[in-house]
Structures are given as structure tokens and as C-alpha cells.
Image: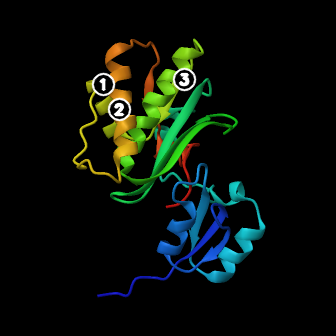
Amino acid sequence: MSKKKKKYYTVWKGHRTGVFETWDDCKAQIKDFQGAQYKSFETFDAAKKALKGNYKDYITKGKFKSGLSEEQLKKIGQPNYNSISVDAASSGNPGIMEYRGVDTKTKKQLFIQGPFEQGTNNIGEFLAIVHGLALLKKKNSDKIIYTDSKTAISWVKKKSCNTKLERNDKNKPVFDLVDRAVLWLKENSYATIIVKWETKAWGEIPADFGRK
């Protein structure tokens, strides 16, 4: 069995900032901290260098290569920038989870929730879409919503969060949001179109937390 590679964790915003050598130490700094900013690195030097820089400079990957032909790219076209993009991040399944929505063109953050102590990526994606739907309806906006989760799209269509995660004291805040989201879907109509983000053609969705 191959030995798991050691990682170093930079925390730009948290209860304490700095470089941490274990996930548990990192987790302690971001738990229950609204808008926490953190990312893992392969080496201590890289993590230390990142700490001196700007978080936003480290959450976008390098040059993206789609692996698609010119014909395929032409068929898919470009994103509709009259839109918002939503995404979630979960460190573990279940694990610390958060979600957010951004303007697709400018990447300006429109909302963010978490980190929550226990959740899953699918739950976060579901909550992010519903949060986006409610926001756009409130603003009477004609923007569309991009998500990279087919699962979350299907849950929204069914007006049900079909997670296998069992409820407990740790994930109560998450399920409180889930219950509110399901209720909102059942009590509200909306004209907003939800579209699958074409990751292969366009790279990571603009709302991506960049912690993969």
C-alpha cells in the first residue's frame, strides 16, 4: 500500500491564520468561521509562500486544457455571462462543507454559507442552487444558474434532497437549511433556468473553491 502524501494547509482567514501540518489542525481553525479561506499544498515552502499572497490568486488552476476537439468546443460554445454560478466544497464525505454563488463573468461573490461541521458535496450543491433561485427571484432577475452537479439539478427538480446522510446533532445546522430549501421549492415557482456547467470545455466553474 502506497504511503499517503503529506500535505500542508494554509489558512488565510480562520480563528488562527498560518500554515498547519495536519488536516485536524487546519479544521480547528476553519470550523464555525464564516467565510474561512484555506487550501492544501504539497510542500511547506509552497504553503508558506501562499500565506504571504492573496487567497484569490491560489484558488484558480493554471492554464486549462479541455481535451476536446475544435468541433466539440464550437458546438458547446461559450458560457452565458448573464448568469450566476454556484458550487460547494466538502473536505470528506461527510466532512466540513460550504457553498457559495458568484457572478459568472466577474466572479464577484454574491453569497457564501459555511463552513458547516458535517455535510456532503451533493447537499452543498443542492443548497447553493436553491439559495441562488431564491436570490434571483427576490431581485426579479432573468439570469440563469450554472452548476456542475447533475445530482443537485435532479434533486431540485424533484423538490427533494435525496441524501443518504443521516441526521445527527453535528449536521443539524445543515439539515435545517435543507428543510428550508425543500420548503421553499414546494412553496415557490420560478422561471430561472438551471444549466449544467461544461467543465470539459470551460474549465472549473467560476464558483469553484479551488481545493481539489
The answer for how far apart the CA atoms under marks 3 and 2 are is 17 Å
- Viewer-nearest of discs 3 and 2: 3
Residue 195 lies, in percent from the top left, at 44, 29
Specify the amino acid type for callout 3: Leu
Contact, mark 2 vs mark 1 (Cβ under 8 Å): yes
In depth, the one of 113 and 206 nearer the eye is 113
Are there few (<14), some (14-19), or many (20+) residues within 10 Å of tag 2? many
In the foreground, 89 or 119 = 119
Where is mark 3, residue-wise? 135
As drawn, is 115 to the left or to the right of 174? right
Distance Cα–Cα, label 1 vs label 3: 18 Å
Place of residue 110 in the rendered image (x, y in percent of width and height, measured from the top left): 63, 34
Q: Kindly tell me whether residue 68 is visible in this rendering.
A: no
Residue designated by label 1: 157
Is residue 99 depicted above or below 39 in this figure? above
First reached walking from the N terminus: tag 1 or tag 3: 3
Inspect the image, locate mark 1, and give the three-letter code of the amino acid beneath it. Lys
Q: Secondary structure at mark 2?
A: helix
The residue under the point 77% across, 65% down is 53
In this picture, is 193 found above or below 109?
A: above
Q: How many marks?
A: 3
Q: Quadrant of residue 158?
A: top left
Tell me what residue is drawn at x 39 percent, y 13 percent. Answer: 188
Labels 3 and 2: the sequence-earlier one: 3
- Judging by the rendered image, the residue that carries numbered circle 2 is 153
Quadrant housing the N terminus: bottom left
Calculate the distance from the C-alpha at mark 2 to the C-alpha at mark 1: 6 Å
Residue 20, percent across and down? 59, 77
For badge 2, the amino acid type reads: Ile
Residue 88 marker? none
Q: Secondary structure at mark 1?
A: helix
- Secondary structure beneath label 3: helix
